[in-house]
Amino acid sequence: MEQQVDSLRAEALAQIASATDAASLEVARLKYLGKSGAITALSEGMRNVPKEDRPKFGKILNDLRAAVTGALEESQKCLLEAADSAAFASLDLTLPGTFPTPGTLHPLTQLMDRAVRCFRRMGFAIADGPDIETEWHCFDALNTPPDHPARNEQDTFYLPDGRLLRSHTSSVQIRVMENTPPPVRIIAPGSAYRRDEVDATHLAQFTQMEGLYVAERVSLADLKGTLEFFFRELFGTGTEIQFRPHFFPFTEPSYEIDIRAAALGGEWMELAGCGMVDPAVFEEICKKRGDRAYDPEKVSGFAFGFGLERLAMNLSRIPDIRMLVENDLRFLKQF
């Protein structure tokens, strides 16, 4: 039996040593260590060995298996090193290298960063909130009546449990006031969702940036000064800005902001909405908090909001809003 093992060892080691590639090495492995291999067959023959000889025979088989496995691993290592050497030998190290294509930030990210930096300089902090909201945070707390068109299922994505995908980031303002006493000065950039038909100017998911400032004696002059500074930082010092009266349920008075700037082609464009926070919003917050921290007789505030896609389209002359979400490198490389 020992002679048979020695003979098999010599045969296996010789075949492994003569293997010139991975395929021939795999053939040798299967021949000796596979399910039908010679060493496997010897192991299965252990049942026919006398009981008193089994420990000795088992040790011989283990030594054989270890020797063959070690030889296979060593041969595989040598073949890999030879392949690497051959690959490097064919390289011409004097050739110029291949330079990676540098990436850039998405145009929306670039615009958001510019806007955030500007508002941070004015003392605004960044606030965040969940994309899935309750009706109270998204509508009730914002003085939006039950029959308002924005609450219709044709305009808002409702979930089976009654929650919804926020249709604006104003819900973040509510959450901040719900959990933080005044003064608060925050901006809330993030995604919003509406059941809009996707076309050249509308997406079902878009990016908003809203702001809120609440403290004692906050005035309309503070609102105008803040937004005039921001838009002139964005579009240039020669930018003309006008506040046109409008209606929003959560602000009173309310305004839409029209901009005329050379960067926008010199034409008036409506780009944002704003207003002084309606006292009804403060009263709703007080009821939710269970205190009078936002007593409208003691504090006042302003809020504003705008869509970043619309700003980016006008600032960069992008003709179709869908280009911002298609991930077409021919478009993105321009930024």
Image (cartoon, rainbow, N blue to C red):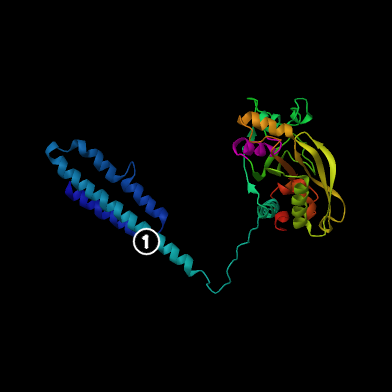
Few, some or many residues within 10 Å of mark 1 (<14, 14–19, 20+): some
Whether residue 142 is visible here, answered yes or no, is no
Residue furthest to the right: 267
Q: Depth check: 108 or 183 in front?
A: 183
Which is the main secondary structure of the residues drawn in magenta? helix
**Frontmost residue, 259 versus 38:** 259
Tell me the magenta residue range.
166-181
Residue at position x 64%, y 43% from top? 183
Q: Is residue 175 magenta?
A: yes
Q: 54 or 259, which lies in front?
A: 259
Q: Describe residue 216's horizontal placement relative to residue 55 as left or right.
A: right
Q: Amino acid at mark 1?
A: Cys
Q: Residue furthest bottom?
A: 94
The answer to whether residue 320 is left or right of residue 17 is: right
Q: Position of residue 323 (x, y in %)?
A: 74, 48
At x 25%, y 55%, the residue is 10
Q: Height in image: 16 above or below 56?
A: below
Per the image, the residue denoted by label 1 is 78
Could you tell whether 264 is left or right of 32 in the image?
right
Q: Determine if the magenta segment contains residue 147.
A: no
Query: Which of these two is toward me, 227 or 11?
Result: 227
Residue 100 horizontal/vertical position (percent):
60, 62
Residue 235 appears in which quarter of the rendering?
A: bottom right
Q: Quadrant of residue 234?
A: bottom right
